[in-house]
Amino acid sequence: MQARKLMLPAMMLTLIIIVSSCSKSIDSCSGSVDCTGVNFSETIQPLASTKCAISGCHGASFDSYSNMKSLADDGQLYSQVVDRQTMPDGGIDMSCEERAQFNCWIDAGAPNN
């Protein structure tokens, strides 16, 4: 009976460890990104052009500041690129530093600079 009482907490702890090890996070690299050097024209726009605005993907959605600002303001950009890291898709790789740069820009209010 005592063994059964200990089994549930042990199973819960194991499940928590497994789930947390599978989650993606930019915490490990965000400290290496200097947010003061991140701006739209020299950082975000080139990343969006090479990682997002490509044939068969988003195209025009990422071709202007106003479109990018809209995606940042409604939370889609943060959710897809930084939090869940489901974008970019189609075998295009984005480093955690690049994701952290998007995070910096969004946290700063997605300025047109």
Image: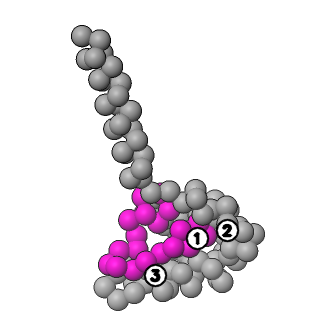
Name the residue: 70% across, 67% down: 35
Can residue 1 be seen?
yes
Report if the CB atoms under discs 3 and 2 are less than 8 Å apart. no
Q: Which amino acid is tagged 2?
A: Val
The answer for how far apart the CA atoms under marks 1 and 2 are is 6 Å
The dot on residue 97 is 1
Residue furthest right as drawn? 36
Mark 1: give few (<14), some (14-19) or many (20+) Cα within 10 Å: some
The answer for how far apart the CA atoms under marks 1 and 3 are is 14 Å
The answer for how far apart the CA atoms under marks 3 and 2 are is 19 Å
Report if the CB atoms under discs 1 and 2 are less than 8 Å apart. yes
Q: Position of residue 28 (x, y in %)?
A: 58, 59
In the rendered view, does 72 fall on the left or right side of 42?
left
Depth check, mark 1 against mark 3: the one in front is 1
Q: Which amino acid is tagged 3?
A: Lys
User: Is residue 76 shown above or below 113?
Assistant: above
Q: What residue is disc 3 on? A: 51
